[in-house]
């Protein structure tokens, strides 16, 4: 992974403000930082634990998740909680913008702030890595775990397929890489557009998204700090210890994190369920939303 390039992040897009639903989120104090979160769904009465979603990045806020309406559908049954990781969006950075230990502590502070002993936890892309790390650290606090197109348990083992699937597009990125690294805005935007074009199974979904994509909410400091930190860890041995029900999801045509990565995660987590979305790239909740809701809702509601 090229730490400072577009290819170094496991998710790199946002939708324009006009496409985002109005939010009614709030912040709370968590160990020297203010964390922003929003809650979808019933304010009370549901016996189910909240589904907390850790978004991709590192360095992006949760706004890109609103490209899909699946969260509102899932929130008909339970609270769904989206949040901005420290140093992104409306959350402050504190003294340490990108240590894994701080990201885990922030997620646990959110759980405590919600007033629950256990959560259902979903992580997408880099957020999948964070969800696995949190669960390894606090297995008693996660009732069910959902991993969606996640980075590998050992960060450097994440398998990108861009060069194999899109050699001409990667070449066009390489042509502007030097200028982009020097801070040339036009070069960075051109590289980002190419990157976005490689995330989808459907050309129609790709074009719809590219027509709307604008204004990334991205912190390079968080991205660089986490990329430097994550190389120290190997979650593989920790996954073998997990005992809660787990669902591992991948898009069949995910060039950003090859399905082989998801398969290895599934094999490492005892008794986990593996689901492939055959008409999806890196964003199955966007490309196959109805099936995504069906699969995730069924998993969350099934008695172990």
Image: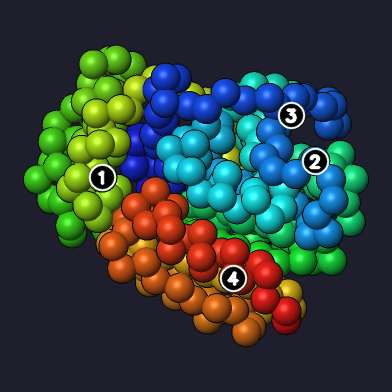
Determine which residue is flagged by label 4.
Answer: 298
Q: How far apart, in angstroms, are the residues tagged by discs 4 and 1? A: 26 Å
Marks 3,2: beta carbons within 8 A: no
The 10 Å Cα crowd at callout 4, few under 14, some 14 to 19, many 20 or more, is: few
- Give the Cα distance between marks 1 and 3: 32 Å
Q: Are marks 1 and 3 in contact (CB under 8 Å)?
A: no
> What percent of the width, then of the height, locates residue 222?
57, 31
Q: Residue at x 83, y 59 (%)?
A: 47
Q: Position of residue 164 (x, y in %)?
A: 18, 59
Residue at 68%, 55% in the rendered image? 77
Q: Nearer the viewer, residue 183 or 141?
A: 141
Residue indicated by mark 1: 205
Q: x%, y% of residue 25?
A: 70, 26
Q: Quadrant of the C terminus?
A: bottom right
The answer to which of 149 and 144 lies nearer the viewer is: 144
Q: Earlier in the sequence, mark 3 or mark 2?
A: 3
User: Is residue 181 shown to the viewer in this render?
Assistant: no
Of residues 224 and 62, which is closer to you in this image?
62
Residue 67 seen anywhere in this rendered image of the structure: yes
Secondary structure at badge 3 equals strand
Name the front one of labels 4 and 1.
4
Residue at x 75% of width, y 24% of height: 26
Q: Secondary structure at mark 4?
A: helix
Front of the two marks 3 and 2: 2
Residue at mark 3 to residue at mark 4: CA–CA distance? 30 Å
In the rendered image, which residue does mark 2 sit on?
43
Residue 35: image tag: 3
Q: Are marks 3 and 4 in contact (CB under 8 Å)?
A: no
Which residue occupies the extreme bottom position in the image? 271
């Amino acid at each position: 992974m090229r730490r400072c390039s577009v290819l170094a992040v496991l998710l790199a897009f946002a939708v324009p403000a006009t496409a985002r639903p109005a939010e009614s989120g709030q912040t709370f104090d968590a160990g020297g930082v203010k964390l922003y979160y929003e809650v979808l769904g019933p304010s009370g009465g549901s016996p189910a634990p909240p589904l907390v979603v850790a978004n991709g990045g590192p360095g992006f806020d949760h706004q890109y998740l609103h490209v899909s309406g699946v969260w509102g559908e899932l929130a008909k049954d339970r609270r769904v909680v989206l949040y901005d990781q420290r140093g992104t969006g409306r959350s402050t950075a504190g003294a340490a913008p990108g240590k894994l230990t701080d990201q885990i502590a922030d997620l646990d502070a959110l759980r405590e702030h919600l007033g629950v002993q256990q959560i259902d936890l979903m992580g997408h892309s880099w957020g999948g890595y964070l969800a696995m790390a949190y669960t390894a650290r606090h297995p008693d606090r996660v009732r069910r775990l959902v991993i969606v197109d996640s980075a590998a348990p050992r960060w450097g083992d994440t398998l990108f397929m861009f060069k194999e699937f899109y050699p001409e597009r990667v070449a066009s990125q390489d042509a502007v890489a030097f200028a982009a690294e020097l801070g040339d805005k036009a070069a960075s935007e051109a590289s980002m557009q190419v990157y976005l074009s490689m995330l989808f199974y459907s050309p129609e979904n790709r074009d719809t998204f590219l027509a709307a994509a604008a204004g990334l909410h991205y912190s390079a400091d968080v991205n660089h700090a986490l990329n430097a930190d994550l190389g120290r860890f190997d979650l593989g041995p920790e996954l073998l210890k997990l005992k809660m029900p787990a669902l591992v999801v991948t898009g069949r045509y995910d060039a950003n994190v090859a399905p082989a990565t998801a398969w290895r995660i599934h094999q490492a987590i005892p008794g986990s369920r593996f689901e492939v979305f055959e008409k999806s790239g890196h964003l199955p909740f966007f490309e196959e939303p109805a099936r995504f809701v069906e699969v995730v809702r069924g998993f969350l509601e099934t008695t172990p």
